[in-house]
Amino acid sequence: MEYTYDDDLEELCPVCGDKVSGYHYGLLTCESCKGFFKRTVQNNKRYTCAENQECKIDKTQRKRCPFCRFQKCLNVGMRLEGNNNNNNNNNSS
Ligand SMILES: [Zn+2]
Ligand SMILES: [Zn+2]
């Protein structure tokens, strides 16, 4: 084995643990969560949780409860206004 892939270089989606595809809505997430978040926001979707709003979200179960998945998206820091830069540099010098 001449090649070794360093696992540390593979960032995992903070929402579901899948491999990330890049920065989406403010942080590194996977393609799936990016699309999910986008659809949710754009379509103004409202979900309801059939459990106690504390479903475990991971790669295999992320589709089971969109409510908890979206909550987790928000909890990990995904922002609706993905292109907005929080740093408003008002150079008044
Ligand atoms: Zn994900
Ligand atoms: Zn749930």
Image (tube, rainbow, N blue to C red):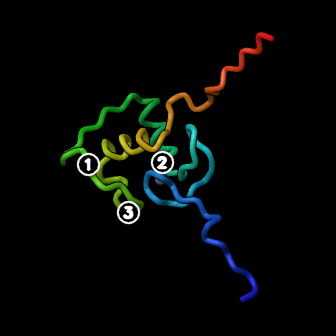
- The verdict on label 1 being within 8 Å of ligand 2 is yes
For marks 1 and 2, the one nearer the N-term is 2
Q: Residues within 10 Å of mark 1 (few under 14, many from 20)?
A: some
Label 2 sits on a secondary structure element that is helix
Q: Nearer the viewer, residue 38 or 7?
A: 7
Q: Which mark is residue 65?
A: none
Q: Which mark is residue 54?
A: 1
In the image, residue 15 lies at what x, y percent?
Answer: 44, 51
Disc 3 from disc 2: Cα separation: 13 Å
Residue at point 53%, 53% (across, down) = 30
Q: Amino acid at mark 1?
A: Glu
Disc 1 from disc 3: Cα separation: 16 Å
Q: In which quadrant will I find the N terminus? A: bottom right
For marks 1 and 3, the one nearer the N-term is 1
In the image, residue 57 lies at what x, y percent?
Answer: 35, 55
Q: Which mark is residue 60?
A: 3
- Residue where numbered disc 2 is placed: 33
Residue at point 39%, 28% (across, down) = 44
Tell whether label 2 touches label 1 (CB within 8 Å): no
Residue at point 42%, 38% (across, down) = 74
Q: Amino acid at mark 3?
A: Thr
For marks 3 and 2, the one nearer the N-term is 2
Disc 1 from disc 2: Cα separation: 18 Å
Q: Nearer the viewer, residue 56 or 67?
A: 56
Q: Nearer the viewer, mark 1 or mark 2?
A: 1
Q: Amino acid at mark 2?
A: Cys
- The verdict on label 2 being within 8 Å of ligand 1 is yes
Q: Residues within 10 Å of mark 3 (few under 14, many from 20)?
A: few
Q: Residues within 10 Å of mark 2 (few under 14, many from 20)?
A: many
Q: Nearer the viewer, residue 91 or 32?
A: 91
